[in-house]
Structures are given as structure tokens and as C-alpha cells.
Image (cartoon, rainbow, N blue to C red):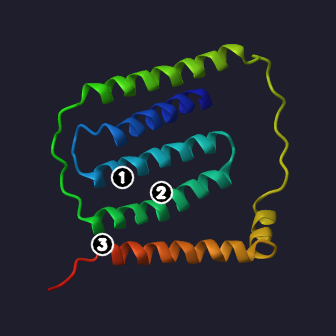
Amino acid sequence: MQDALFYVFAALTLGFGFLVIANPFSRNPVTSAMFLVLTIASLAGLFVLLHAFFLAAVQVLVYAGAVMVLFLFVIMLLDLKAEERRKIKKLGLAAGVISVGVILAIFLLSLANSPLAASPAPTLEGGTVALGKLLCTQYLLPFEIVSVLLLVAIVGVVLLSKKELR
């Protein structure tokens, strides 16, 4: 059953990831953002299959929740119109195909040169309690600095996208 679920979640992740970039249903960026939420949710399913429940929860709460809400606010504040269809430039298309081919060749070469021996089972070095204690004691200042930077970025986006009233 676990193997079947892996293939289902992997196919969903790849399918939704493809739809984020090449969306045939709509040219609206909000639709692509919603497909990104589905990609993140299916990745969380893969984390659950790996028994990484904390990572799955963080994936859903932080990325699908907070970051995607931020993306949607930015998309809606920028007031993006449906992009007009443009002609595909032959030079750009050729460069893209060559780039994908080089990356695929590097991936296949590294896969062919890697040993196929089974790696030992990973050992767990702590859990979420230790991580929470570290974030709230030793790393409290950097944690709060990051939260203030995110707040400043949100306020900056709102101010930059605000239209002047005349």
C-alpha cells in the first residue's frame, strides 16, 4: 500500500508542479498559485510516507498556509492582468531546450556513477521539542529578526503597489 501511495503522491506532485508553470486552464496567476498549493500538499503526503510528520505539518502550515497567502496578496495587490500571448522567440526556445538537455545529462551521468548500495537507516537526532526549545531560547533573536523582516517586506509590498490617488 505504501508503494502505491508513493506513486500516487509523486504523480500528483509532478502533475501539479507542471500545471504551476504550464497552466492550460487559465492565464491567471492566481490559478498557478492554487496549483502550487496542491503541489505543496502532495509533497506533504510524501513526507508522511517517510514518517516525517513534523516536516509534513510544517510544509502545510508554513508553505501552503503562510507563504501562499503572502504570494496571493502580492499577486492581487500588483493587479496583474492576463498576459497577452507572445510569439515564442527561436533563440530563447533553443537556449531553453539546450539548458534542459544539459541538466538532464548531468543528472543521468551522476545517477549512472552513483553506487547502488543500500544506505543505512537514518538515526533520529532529536525531535520537535528540542527544536522548539532552541528557537525560543538560543536562537530567539534571529527568529524575531526574521519575523520583523517579513513584516517590513509585507508593508513594503503594500506601499509599492498602492496606487496614488489624485
Between residues 104 and 51, which one lies in front from this camera angle? 104
Give the residue displayed 56% in from the left and 47% down from the top: 44
Check disc 1 and give the amino acid type.
Answer: Ala
Between residues 129 and 104, which one lies in front from this camera angle? 104
Residue 42 against residue 158 in the figure, above or below:
above
Check disc 2 and give the amino acid type.
Answer: Ala
Which quadrant, please, contains the N terminus?
A: top right
- Name the residue that disc number 1 marks: 33
Measuring from the top left, give residue 148's x and y in whole percent: 57, 78
Which quadrant, please, contains the C terminus?
A: bottom left
Label 2 crowd (10 A; few <14 / some 14-19 / many >=20): many
For the residues labelled 1 and 3, the Cα–Cα distance comes to 19 Å
For the residues labelled 2 and 3, the Cα–Cα distance comes to 23 Å
Q: Which mark is residue 64?
A: 2
Q: Nearer the viewer, mark 2 or mark 3?
A: 3
Give the residue displayed 80% in from the left and 76% down from the top: 137
- Name the residue that disc number 3 marks: 161
Numbered disc 1: secondary structure: helix
Numbered disc 2: secondary structure: helix
Measuring from the top left, give residue 32's x and y in whole percent: 33, 48
Pick whichever of labels 2 and 3 is earlier in the sequence: 2
Give the residue displayed 81% in from the left and 27% down from the top: 119
139 vs 2, left or right, is right
